[in-house]
Image (cartoon, helix red, strand yellow):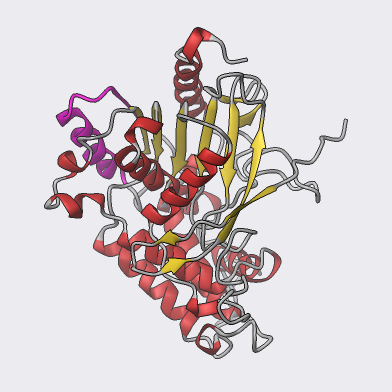
Amino acid sequence: MIPTPTIPQILQVDKPLQMVSGATLPRYELIYETYGELNADASNAILICHALSGDHHVAGVDADGKPGWWDGYIGPGKPIDTDQFFVVCSNNLGGCRGSTGPTSINPDNGRIYGPDFPIVTCRDWVNSQNELRQHLGIEQWAALVGGSMGGMQVLQWAIDYPEKVRHAVVIAAAPKLSAQNIAFNEVARRAIMSDPEFHNGRFIEAGTTPKTGLALARMLGHLTYLSDDMMGNKFGRELREGKLQYNYEVEFQVESYLRYQGEKFATKQNFDANTYLLMTKALDYFDPAAEYEHDLSAALAKATAKFLVVSFTSDWRFSPQRSHEIVKALLDNDADVSYAEVTSEHGHDAFLLPNAHYEGVFRAYMARVAAELPQGDSK
């Protein structure tokens, strides 16, 4: 049977959004998808927060038959069971998949925002998502779930809107980026901004796309998402032609793989370059403890949610040690926190991929969320 496509919806917010940068968005749109049914008292809602290149299409299939980026974990009978939960996922503000962002029209001048779109932060995303919560009539999320950059949003929600979150699931995340991670992001941005087709961010008006820079940025990012063991097992030093060619063309299979990923991102996926710049900057700026004299325990003191924190052994970009920092800060506040360190060779990408241990932990925790629904009824 051909699955029924999920139809996205758009929320028009006419209330101005005061952003952390000092800028104000007079109005904006959020595109989102929902799965499952909201129960009578709106107590079974779960918000999924996406990672850097993700979007609102998290499960099911879209109009083109494309599966959601986390379809393996969301749906009937899956760890996030849509027979029990009402699942919501929106494209982040500043994105390029339907929410207001650099590809949108600036109402002040009728031009494409491009580089004029204001810098966004994790707090801005959470504040805009809170507008969606109110629009849907949800008093409190049964759970917030996010991996990588999505996990950072979950932490920000727990800090800024503690009364609106019952459970917080933080996967493969960190309380702030390391200097090395900020450096990776800066190299990626330089690759994009140095592309002759970037046109100071006005490439849409110029009728071009900085494909080379965007592909290089994605190649670098993708490289950091994989582990050395996984790359070694998958590619090793395998040659495409079976022998060295002694030139600068693609010779190793791993080179071919990275070039393919970069090219696909810049062309087939058509990800907006200005959005990539915005998202990486938001990652760099995320540091909730900075407002509390760099004391993460103090930053999380107001959080009342119950937590599940998950890390992966081969994830060197957001290593298990970074999750340990989150767990310690929560325990310092006597929070209800569960922690799982999952063995995987897939690096940072592991949170998106099948893994029996990971799925078991995830499924068990979501069963706990379902069991704790008010009135004990998920329908």
Residue 221 pos. (x, y %): 46, 63
Q: Is residue 320 magenta?
A: yes
Q: Does the magenta stretch include residue 25?
A: no
Q: Residue at x 48, y 42 (%)?
A: 350
Q: Which of 369 and 127 is in front in this view?
A: 127
Residue 150 pos. (x, y %): 45, 46
| Quarter in which the C terminus is drawn | top right
Residue 307 pos. (x, y %): 34, 28
Residue 313 pos. (x, y %): 35, 39
Residue at the top extreme, as displayed: 376
Read off the magenta span: 319-341
Residue at the front extreme, as displayed: 15
Q: Which residue is drawn at 81% across and 51% down?
A: 64
Q: In this view, does 185 lie above or below 59?
A: below
Q: In which quarter of the image is residue 183?
A: bottom left
Q: In which quarter of the image is residue 212?
A: bottom right
The answer to whether residue 341 of the structure is visible from this angle is no
The answer to whether residue 309 of the structure is visible from this angle is yes
314 on left or right of 96? left
Q: Is residue 38 above or below residue 377?
A: below
Q: Which residue is drawn at 25% across and 39% down?
A: 326
Q: In this view, does 41 lie above or below 18?
A: above
189 on left or right of 9? left
